[in-house]
Amino acid sequence: MSLRGISIAMEKSKSLSDIGSSRRQFLKTSSVAALGSALASPLALTRKASAARSPGDTLKVGLVGCGGRGSGAAAQALSTGEGVVLTAMGDAFEERVKSSRKSLASDDQFGQRVKVPDNACFVGLDAYQKVIDSGVDVVLLATPPGFRPQHLRAAVEAGKHVFCEKPVATDAPGVRSVLQSAAKAKEKNLALVSGYCWRYHPGRRAFYQRIHQGAIGSLRAIYATYLTGPVKPMPAASSRPAGMSDVEWQLRNWYNFVWLSGDGLVEQACHSIDKIAWAMNGVLPLKAVATGGRQFPNHEGNIFDHIDVFYEFPDGVRAFMAQRQISGCYSDNSDYLMGSEGVGTIKGWNEPTITGKESWRYSGPKADMYQVEHDELFASIRSGKPINDGIWMAHSTLMALMGRMAAYTGREISWTEALNSEEKLVPDNLTWNMDLPIKPMAMPGQTKFV
């Protein structure tokens, strides 16, 4: 399908069904694989069959991005069973590859299946391609999200199954690229599992299923919060080592640059935005307005530290996303759904509840959602029915980008405008020593929509 065809399908889609921690604590639980299968979403149950892999086949895994999240993803992949082996690792920085390999290999649960020789440890901006070309079957993508579209495209073109961390892009051209890759993965019967981990949480799955079945009547409004402290504060410009290139400085402080992280709304609060999308069951927002800015100096960085987004959906449904990353303030990471006949609440990490038309609190099986992602990914590969989360993970990322666009420009931004935006943040042909000036921080009312 052409990109235009994909975009039209996105605009017309009404239901996601149409388109498809603690690791050690989790390892102490039992029957997790069976639980993941029993709790699999409808998306995972209706896939087009491909040639099934025998449960006894060894699946070789390559890790791209060896920071904390990438190392965690590798541990979860290895925890899916004896038939999974880590054989290649890559990162822009050598020390991260070495540290991650050492940590994974020392784990007494799966360390013997970390089979990554020195010549399969790849370093540099092209490390992702070397991992992909090393003979692996599954690629775990966990670099800063600005690189995600390029890495996903390369993995799918090479015929690899993919675990793709969230968000999937930092600009609209990147989202459009991801849509093309997702379509290509579907054509090739490749698994593509998203790092929007709440979609794999048993209690949240049960909660949103009830919401979709009318447990609170017609959904009228959603209020989501992501109010927390700074994630990776930007060091002072004076701390930059002499001779360090623009590219290395920005990569080492990636969270603070829009082209790499997308801003806190996109990189962190995207989980809450994804739950808004989940609640809406695939109905896309019509438009959004937003407020935001930078309360505390960010030295050379260019992301906001607070953004509030106000989404409008068909039939007058509204969603409100409050995001803030400032120390010393009230914290909340919750979801409040208001319906015509009740209220649904997810307060922090507590189990979801419903009040009003019916009273309900989730009390079913528990599992580590990060592990369930990988259990279901590898099970789908072996069953010959690969999961493809591509469309909805792109939708959720674009919803976050739409909110950032509205906050940065001070404009009302429609879904169509966001999708078709030509603002390209990620540089082409990135090299270590290229000049990469830091773009000034956005100024609402002055920054132009592109």
Image (cartoon, rainbow, N blue to C red):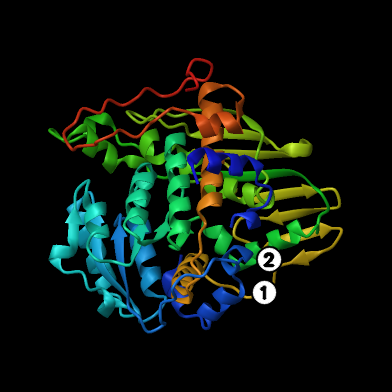
The residue that label 2 is drawn on is: 206
Please identify, in this view, whether the residue under mark 1 or under mark 2 is nearer the observer.
2
Considering only order in the chain, which callout, 2 or 1, is on the residue closer to the N terminus?
A: 2
In the picture, measured across the screen, residue 165 lies left or right of residue 35, that is left
The kind of residue on which mark 1 rests is: Gly
Residue 227 visible? The answer is no
Q: Where is residue 191 in the image (x, y as percent from the top left)?
A: 45, 63
Q: Residues within 10 Å of mark 2 (few under 14, many from 20)?
A: some
In the picture, measured across the screen, residue 119 lies left or right of residue 400, that is left
Q: Where is residue 424 in the image (x, y as percent from the top left)?
A: 39, 30
The residue that label 1 is drawn on is: 364
Instruction: Tell me the element at label 2.
Output: helix
Instruction: Tell me the element at label 1.
Output: loop
Q: Do the residues labelled 1 and 2 touch (CB within 8 Å)?
A: yes
Quarter of the view holding residue 58: bottom left
How far, Cα to Cα, is label 1 from label 2? 9 Å
Q: Position of residue 377 (x, y in %)?
A: 46, 68
Residue 157 visible? The answer is yes
In the picture, measured across the screen, residue 91 lies left or right of residue 423, that is left
Query: In the image shown, does 178 or 447 lie closer to the viewer?
Result: 178
Q: Residue at x 42, y 74 (%)?
A: 24
